[in-house]
Image (cartoon, rainbow, N blue to C red):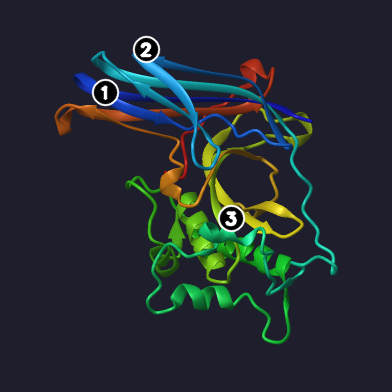
Amino acid sequence: MPLLTIHHKTEYRYAHPVAFGEHRIMLRPRDGHDLRVLEGSLEIEPQPMSLRWIHDVFGNSVAIATFDERAETLSFVSTATIEHNPAEEFALTPDDTAYFYPFLYSDEEFPDLLQFINPQYGDPDGELTAWALDFLDAEGPTPTFKILSNMTHGIREAFSYRKRHEHGTQHPLDTLQTKSGSCRDYALFMIEALRRLGIAARFVSGYIAIPGDRAHGYVGGGNTHAWVQVYLPSAGWIEFDPTNGIVGTRDLVRVAVARDPSQAIPLHGTYLGSADAFVGMEVDIKVVSAGAGTRMGASVEAGV
């Protein structure tokens, strides 16, 4: 069971001292049977006037910082050591309710899944629906895993990954029409396609660990990342990463889940000052085997 240490530093720089509004930090990994946080710390400079932790509507850990001091730089350093036990790829049997599509959610589960089944973005000409329907077999029911796997790998193979520095996530139709986007764009696109098939899907924000040699552990490398969770009766929430073609939690460290990407932003806040006061932002992320020490490697944040 590998132990990983995640080091995430974000620093904002300004041309002159500015005041800071409230900042919300969503960087603490999300505990579960496949992931356990052993140690965690959050260092902020200048020190906030107050720092409180809450669980949001989805149960994610969120730190909220408020400030009473002006400064030319504002930095956040999150460090977490986790026990990561990637789940085996799920396997449904013909006796399972969701083995074939279409399937029905139970009366007990459906009301709680409704927010993840209803599409959130418009599709006036049915382009997104048509794209999703292409993954169904022409005759007879389609194995559900075939739909999910083919869609995951289909996005990875047919679309071109690109970093975007614009604020937010692009509309799923823009992703379809340009066949390009960031990991957050890919995730939202797949989620909306699945919802048009009546399959419950939600957004996941976290980290991807990039192993040098998996036999010797993670020796440094990693990025912020985003992917998809799909809910299937008897299987629960299953991860699908259309950016890398990953099914399951191999190399994926979950931080937050949400109905929409706007609800799972790793770090955001405001400053009080002129628009030209902002000079820039630097992000440094390391995901390493615990105890790797000097073997750490750095990379920049992805999926903006």
Seen from the viewer's position, the closer of residues 107 and 118 is: 107
Look at the numbered discs 3 and 2 and tell me whether their residues touch, using CB distance below 8 Å: no
Residue that numbered label 3 is attached to: 112
Residue drawn at point x = 73 percent, y = 84 percent? 140
Between discs 1 and 2, the one toward the N terminus: 1
Task: Residue 72: name its quadrant.
Answer: top left
From what the image shows, is residue 179 above or below residue 162?
A: below
Residue located farthest toward the front when viewing the structure as drawn? 108
Between discs 3 and 2, the one toward the N terminus: 2
Residue 47: assigned label: 2
Residue drawn at point x = 69 percent, y = 17 percent? 291
Between discs 3 and 1, the one toward the N terminus: 1
Residue 242 seen: no
Nearest to viewer (mark 3 / mark 2): 3
From what the image shows, is residue 101 above or below residue 277?
A: below
Identify the secondary structure beneath mark 3: helix
Look at the numbered discs 1 and 2 and tell me whether their residues touch, using CB distance below 8 Å: no
Residue 128 position within the rendered picture, expressed as x and y whole percent measured from the top left: 47, 72
* Quadrant of image for the C terminus: top left
Q: Report, in whole angstroms, how far the alpha carbon at label 3 lies from the one at label 1.
A: 37 Å
The answer to whether residue 295 is left or right of residue 71 is right
Identify the secondary structure beneath mark 2: loop
* Quadrant of image for the N terminus: top right
From what the image shows, is residue 10 above or below residue 176?
A: above
Instruction: Name the amino acid, label 3.
Output: Asp
Residue 20: assigned label: 1
